[in-house]
Every structure is written in structure tokens, then in C-alpha cells.
Image (cartoon, rainbow, N blue to C red):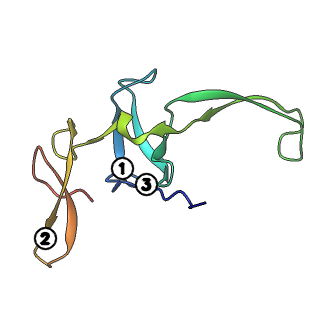
Amino acid sequence: MKDKVTTTAKIKIRKGDLVKVIAGDSKGQQGTVLQVQIAKSRIVVEGVNLVSKHTKPNAATPNGGIIKKEAALHISNVMLIDPKSGETTRVGRKLNADGKLVRVSKKSGEEIK
């Protein structure tokens, strides 16, 4: 029996980027990327897609209870926000003056830090 080989797409969004949700229940919200799960093509965005998680009492939380926590979103449901205009944009890649490959905004052509 052959092992299933999975290929992952090139993810153009990185941890720390400012993104906007373009589809789903959290549509229109924006926040910074906290975590990128490359194998699953999912990301966790600060303050977006909050779910209620029931926790048992432990040393950290003596009473336990219900906490709000960010759940992962699929990468296709978010779009990067252009640092210059503040609008959503697609991401391209170009060589900069140093000959290094950098991410650039498709709308403004500005480098994404």
C-alpha cells in the first residue's frame, strides 16, 4: 500500500501580518496573525473566530469554567491588508535592490515587511 503524499500550497501570509476575513461568520473582522498551520492551510487571527471552550479546574484556572478562544480559519478566507492604502490586496513576490525575494502588495506595489 502506498503512502498518501500531500502537497502544500505556498502560503503568502505570515505570523504578524494584518489580515481581514473575507468569508464566513467573522466576515469583515480584521486582526494580526498569531499562528500559521502550514500542513492544514489554516491560520489563527487575534480576536477573530472566537469559540467557547469549557475548561476543567487546574492549577492555572482553579475554578475552571468557559473561556473564549480563537479558532483556526482556512487561509482562503482571509486576505492581507495593504500597508499603504489599508485595503485588502493579493500578494506577489519580487526581487528587491539587494537581490532578495520579498513579498509585495499587488495593489500598491509596496514591499510587505
Question: Could you say whether the residue bearing mark 2 is in a helix, strand or loop?
Answer: loop
* Image location of residue 11, percent across then percent down: 35, 54
* Image location of residue 48, percent across then percent down: 49, 32
Q: What residue type is labelled 2?
A: Asn
Q: What residue type is labelled 1?
A: Asp
The residue singled out by tag 2 in the image is 96
Q: Nearer the N terminus, badge 1 or badge 2?
A: 1
Q: Do the residues labelled 1 and 3 touch (CB within 8 Å)?
A: yes
* Closest to the observer, 78 or 20: 78
Picture mark count: 3
The residue singled out by tag 1 in the image is 17
Q: Quadrant of residue 78?
A: top left
The residue singled out by tag 3 in the image is 15
Q: What residue type is labelled 3?
A: Lys
Please report the residue visible at 87 percent of the width from the left and 35 percent of the height from the top: 56
Mark 2 crowdedness (10 Å alpha carbons): few <14, some 14-19, many ≥20? few
Q: Nearer the N terminus, badge 3 or badge 2?
A: 3
* Image location of residue 61, percent across then percent down: 84, 40
17 vs 5: above or below: above
**Viewport quadrant of the N terminus:** bottom right
Distance from the alpha carbon under mark 3 to that under mark 2: 21 Å
27 vs 8: above or below: above
Distance from the alpha carbon under mark 1 to that under mark 2: 20 Å
